[in-house]
Amino acid sequence: MAAGAAGVAYAAGFEARSFRLRRVTVPVLPPGMRPLRVLQVSDIHMVGGQRKKQRWLQSLAGLRPDFVINTGDNLSDPEGVPEVLDALGPLMEFPGAYVFGSNDYYGPRMRNPARYLLEKANGKHGLNGNAPAVGVIHNPWEDLRDGFDAAGWLNLTNTRGVLKVEGVSVELTGLDDPHIKRDRYARVAGGPSGSYDFSMGVVHAPYLRVLDAFTADGYPLVLAGHTHGGQLCIPFYGALVTNCDLDTDRVKGLSRHTAEGHTSYLHVSAGCGTNRYTPVRFACPPEATLLTLVGREE
């Protein structure tokens, strides 16, 4: 019992607040194109009073990325919008884009963590596309959207956008959250337009139907979040669940995805927060990622 209590204390008191930056190099750009530095932040799940998290997010502006991609689930508290915007304020000085996750729209509910294992065994994945339960809290996502938009970040909700970065044009194609079936790929289907220097896909939850669509359409890179890296992992084994239909081998970090004869790079962020009712991480520290995109081999 003492060992269990110590483990919970570590997971909640230390590891869940042990923020770190991962650096990843991805060979996806056209040969000869200058490298691009992309900061991905995800799954902040802000709760009032999380000062250390806010200061850490603010400090990431010191990396001076070319642009920022926010892959959703910024909130875990309906009162958290001002703190999210304050934490991301220095990063919003850089070009950026965002998609939302289910927790941006709806407040979390208290759940037994063991249910994730049971749902996996039964072939289900979290909300699994179901409508939120009666009485669920609706988060003020419109205020969050307005704050991002006012800073000039692109809203990629089932649409496309273009960032101009020091003479380089980056085409971004985004989807609303597949976890609650708000994705509408038909609206953005067709693949990269070919009119820009580089194109990539952005989504919150890395469901296979979405990854298949992006990859089959020829996007060389897809960024996603949602999984929390498994959140409670087993040392030397890894994650038990992904909270979607992605396999646990790709629960976080860089991997490849193949569909219809095409292969894309996939980067899944483990995120830097947790649901307010399960504020623990084990063998899966909170993170942001600085991706350096470089020229692919010819």
Image (cartoon, rainbow, N blue to C red):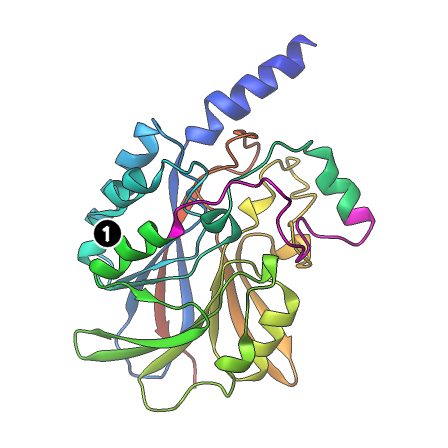
In this picture, residue 227 sits left or right of residue 91: right
Q: Can you give x and y, in whole percent of width and height, for residue 38 in the image?
A: 32, 62
- For disc 1, the marked residue is 91
Q: Residue at x 39, y 36 (%)?
A: 19
> Which of the two residues, 162 or 181, is positioned nearer the viewer here?
181
Q: Can you give x and y, in whole percent of width and height, for residue 201 in the image?
A: 46, 72
Q: Residue furthest top?
A: 2
From this view, report whether residue 99 is shown above or below residue 7: below
Q: Can you give x and y, in whole percent of width and height, for residue 101 in the image?
A: 49, 54
Residue 270 appears in the picture as rendered? no
- As for residue 216 lying within the magenta part, the answer is no
Residue 98 appears in the picture as rendered? yes
From this view, report whether residue 65 is shown above or below residue 241: below
From this view, report whether residue 145 is shown above or below residue 260: above
Q: Residue at x 31, y 84 (%)?
A: 197
Q: Residue furthest front?
A: 134
Give the overall secondary structure of the magenta segment.
loop
Within 10 angstroms of label 1, few (less than 14), some, or many (20 or more) residues?
A: many
Q: Can you give x and y, in whole percent of width and height, for residue 26 in the image?
A: 42, 67
- Quadrant where the C terminus is found in the figure: bottom left
In this picture, residue 127 sits left or right of residue 15: right
> Which of the two residues, 275 or 58, is positioned nearer the viewer here?
275
Q: Residue furthest right?
A: 122
Type of amino acid under label 1: Leu
Q: Residue at x 16, y 74 (%)?
A: 166
- Quadrant where the N terminus is found in the figure: top right
Q: Which region shows up in magenta?
A: 120-141
> Which of the two residues, 276 or 66, is positioned nearer the viewer here?
276
- As for residue 135 lying within the magenta part, the answer is yes
Tag 1's secondary structure?
Answer: helix
Where is residue 97, by image quadrant? bottom left
Where is residue 2, by image quadrant? top right
